[in-house]
Image (cartoon, grey):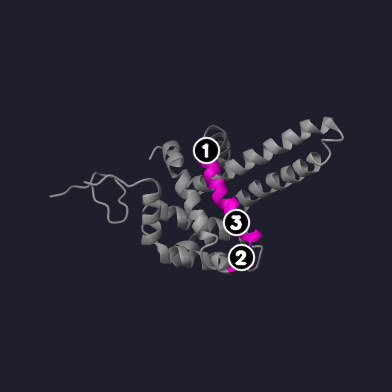
Amino acid sequence: MLFQKKGAVQGFNQDSDNPERTGPARFWELVKGELATVLIANLLFLAACIPVITIPPALFSLHLVMRKIVLGESVSCVRDYFAAFKQGWRCAYGAFFLTVVPMGIAGYGAAFYQRRMSEYPVFIAPFALCTTVFLVAMLASTYLYGLLCSGKSLRNSIKPALILGVAKPLRAVLAALCYYGMLLLAVLFFPLSGLYLFLIGFSLPCLLGNFYIRTVIKQYLGF
């Protein structure tokens, strides 16, 4: 007779005698097991973004559903998505603007000073500052959404997200490449990428990004 350890979280078709699969094998196991949820979540996200002003809670809800998949939790896509949309909209707007504003200002500043560095070397210093702010904000944003989806408040998530972004940059870089890099590539190759964006262009990168940061978040939270 098999006994499950108390508090253990079981994945898909995983029992207590088998160790949890990790790496690419585990990720594709998640995708195959919840492909319908990934597709539905992508459509829900696109629909929720139509008013534009609802993009922040739509993004937060997508992260929450994808994180539940990564953790092997039971997911009711439509119910969980709109529950997160309704209950988490305040912190969703806060997280969105805390991410977009620093990255936008720092990114513009870095581009502005970069064009003038060759003529005025004094601009190297503000360019370096803007680049640093942009990178830190980008890396911290990957952990910020992970912490929020783990139940921490926005106020209690900002500082640890910044610390983890600097102290644990590798996982954050991989997650950022998923969140921002894959979206940028899809936009550059539009309209060829139109079907990809419509079906999984937002949910799949979100799932992969949450998959990368899950172990760091787990170590920080202690469970």
Quadrant of res 154 = top right
| Residue 206 located within the stretch drawn in magenta | no
Cα–Cα gap, marks 3 and 1: 19 Å
Q: Which residue is mark 1?
A: 170
For disc 2, the neighbor class at 10 Å (few under 14, some 14 to 19, many from 20) is some
Q: Earlier in the sequence, mark 1 or mark 2?
A: 2
Few, some or many residues within 10 Å of mark 1 (<14, 14–19, 20+):
some
Q: Which residue sits at x=68%, y=36%? A: 132
Region of the chain picked out in magenta, as a range: 170-194
Q: Mark 3 sits on what residue? A: 183
Picture coordinates of residue 98, whole percent (x, y): 65, 46
Q: Check disc 3: other Cα within 10 Å, few if <14, some if 14-19, many if 20+.
A: some
Residue 43 point in image, percent of width and height: 52, 68
Give residue 191's position: percent from left, percent from top: 64, 68
Residue 112 vertical placement versus 86 (above, below): above
Q: Which residue is mark 2?
A: 49
Q: Write down the quadrant of residue 88 in the picture.
A: bottom right
Q: Position of residue 204 (x, y in %)?
A: 49, 58
Residue 136's place in the image compared with 53, above or below, is: above
**First of labels 3, 1 by sequence position:** 1
Query: Where 135 falls versus 208 (above or below)?
Result: above
